[in-house]
Image (spheres, helix red, strand yellow):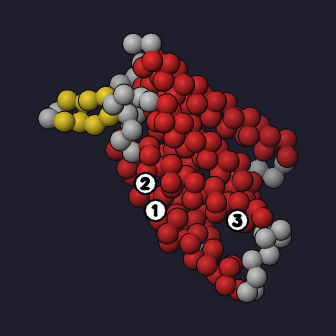
């Protein structure tokens, strides 16, 4: 079960980063697509990652001792909470920019509320990755050194800032039209 979770996590991470980069380039006007088909594959993998694997672990952990042991299990519950935040923000993300009607893509006005939901999505993904990157790398047997993990955190931070910056520039563009 843990190996399947690792495989799903790596696939989901790759698809999420690729979709985020493609979407950022689209918002900046550099490209014309955000990989919508790829994103729907990611939603399927996310469903498997969430429902099949982690939900069972969460219920087992909360049932086992009768007490939640909040302080001792803070990281465990922070991981679950950040994952739940991603799921909630994902509902705001799907269809936020526009939709296809009669073969024509129609853009929706990008309001302040939409800006905030998209920035919250980026932030929740970032927090979830920060909390779960180390266990993922350990289960893959790739990186055990703190310095190498720091490099990965730096790369991740740059990608997140790029995505957030693209969303903010898109919002500024909408308000200057």
Between residue 108 and residue 58, name the one nearer to us: 108
Q: Pointers 2 and 3 in contact (CB under 8 A)?
A: no
Mark closest to the chain's N terminus, 2 or 3: 2
| Residue 64: quarter of image | bottom right
Taking the spot 28% from the left edge, 37% from the top edge, the residue there is 99
Between residue 166 and residue 137, name the one nearer to us: 166
Please indicate whether residue 93 sits to the left or right of residue 67 in the image: left
Which residue position is annotated with label 1? 47
Which residue position is annotated with label 3? 77
Q: Secondary structure at mark 3?
A: helix
Taking the spot 78% from the left edge, 64% from the top edge, the residue there is 74
In 3D space, how far apart are the residues under numbered discs 2 and 3 (Cα atoms)?
A: 22 Å
Taking the spot 76% from the left edge, 62% from the top edge, the residue there is 75
Q: Residues within 10 Å of mark 3 (few under 14, many from 20)?
A: some
Instruction: Please identify, in this view, whether the residue under mark 2 or under mark 3 is nearer the observer.
Output: 3
Q: Is residue 61 visible?
A: yes
The quarter of the picture where the N terminus appears is: bottom right
* Above or below: residue 105 compared with residue 128: above
Q: Secondary structure at mark 2?
A: helix
Between residue 170 and residue 115, name the one nearer to us: 115
In 3D space, how far apart are the residues under numbered discs 2 and 1 (Cα atoms)?
A: 6 Å
In 3D space, how far apart are the residues under numbered discs 3 and 1 (Cα atoms)?
A: 19 Å
Q: Which mark is residue 43?
A: 2
Q: Pointers 2 and 1 in contact (CB under 8 A)?
A: yes
């Amino acid at each position: 079960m843990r190996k399947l979770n690792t495989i799903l996590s790596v696939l989901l991470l790759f698809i999420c980063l690729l979709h985020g980069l493609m979407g950022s380039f689209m918002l900046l006007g550099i490209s014309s697509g955000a990989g919508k088909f790829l994103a729907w594959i990611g939603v399927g993998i996310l469903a498997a990652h969430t429902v099949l694997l982690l939900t069972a672990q969460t219920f087992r952990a909360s049932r086992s001792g009768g007490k939640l042991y909040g302080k001792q299990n803070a990281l465990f519950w922070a991981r679950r909470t950040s994952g739940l935040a991603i799921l909630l923000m994902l509902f705001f993300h799907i269809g936020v920019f526009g939709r296809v009607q009669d073969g024509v893509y129609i853009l929706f006005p990008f309001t302040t509320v939409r800006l905030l939901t998209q920035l919250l999505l980026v932030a929740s993904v970032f927090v979830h990755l920060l909390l779960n990157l180390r266990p993922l790398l350990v289960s893959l047997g790739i990186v055990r050194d703190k310095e190498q993990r720091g490099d990965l955190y730096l790369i991740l931070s740059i990608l997140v800032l790029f995505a957030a910056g693209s969303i903010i520039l898109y919002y500024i563009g909408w308000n200057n039209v």
